[in-house]
Image: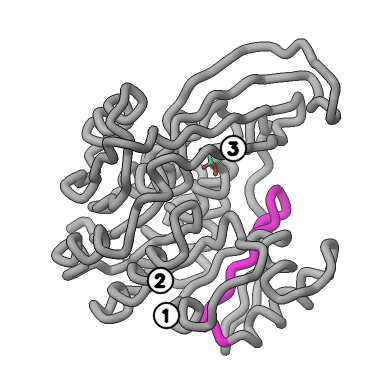
Amino acid sequence: MPQRIVVVGSANTDLVCLTGHLPQPGETVLGGRFVQAAGGKGANQAVAAQRLGAEVWFVARLGDDAYGDAALASYRLAGLHTDHITRDAKAPSGVALILVDAAGENVIVVAPGANETLRPDHVEHAESAFEEAAVVLLQLEVPLDTALAAAQLGRASGAQVMLNPAPMPADGLPAELLSCVDVLTPNTTEASRLVDLPDGADDEALAAALRGIGVPTVVLTRGARGALVVTADAHFAVTPPAVDAVDTTAAGDAFNGALAVALAENRPLLAATRRACAAGALAATRVGAQPSLPRLDELDRLCPM
Ligand code: RIB
């Protein structure tokens, strides 16, 4: 039987331009292909988990506009439970402007729009979805107090609470939020900001400092180098399968969605991390956020459970 995952997070439409190289400030670059695709860290992680076999409830906010209509239709098609997606009559749907270079690296600017009006009371109205949730999966493209309300509800309902702290707020994360988190999945930049170490700090030092803030399971994501996992009684690194990356957008979201599903299914942490790394690698082989998220059969082929 599929495990239930609740995702509280952002929904965007991604406007993507492929380019040979990323422009410097003040520079105009003639790029290549333009792609419009469904994105947003919350929606990406929700769709990733759904494709990998979970039953996913998505709590989000869209504008009352054409991007919002298209996003909602795509979530329904993907099989997400959408009862707790509300519309804002005044704010536009979230949009992300994304540039992807020839090496598959990206820069992203998000205009959050209606994501900013996802409030704690929307989470409270979705309380019934949290009952029987195995995992509550959160990111930070929605207001911090909304993420906190979701983490507290997840903790109270007995779910594992996973936080992908992206983007990391300039002044870090409140202890109140961290105290409700079971699994924290920062990348190295987010981790450095969270524990106040310089960019480029050693990964082991980062993971140790993160454990020092009291989160039971730290999964430090390291892009093509995979992930470093530290808990009270485990410490290991996982390297992803080698792939030809064309666009790393949403590779982290595929990682988080896959990790959430494996944890919801009670898989051992090592197997869950291998699966997450493989899902991230697969997502990097295709252009766009949600179009690139792997399906269960291809993930099973690359990384059998
Ligand atoms: O993680 C990738 C996502 O970040 C994109 O889909 C974009 O919408 C931004 O939210």
The residue at the point 64 percent across, 46 percent down is: 241
Q: Could you give the CA–CA distance between mark 1 and mark 3, rounded to whole angstroms?
A: 28 Å
Up the image or down, 43 lies above or below 184; here it is: above
Q: Residues within 10 Å of mark 2 (few under 14, many from 20)?
A: many
Q: Quadrant of residue 212?
A: bottom right
Up the image or down, 113 lies above or below 20; here it is: below
Q: Which mark is residue 63?
A: none
Q: Which mark is residue 249?
A: 3
Q: Secondary structure at mark 2?
A: helix
Q: Which mark is residue 148?
A: 2
Up the image or down, 127 lies above or below 64; here it is: below
User: Mark 3 near ligand 1 (CB under 8 Å)?
Assistant: yes
The residue at the point 65 percent across, 73 percent down is: 236
Q: Quadrant of residue 186?
A: bottom right
Q: Secondary structure at mark 3?
A: loop
Q: What amino acid is at disc 2? A: Leu
Q: Could you give the CA–CA distance between mark 3 and mark 2, rounded to whole angstroms?
A: 26 Å
Residue of label 1: 180
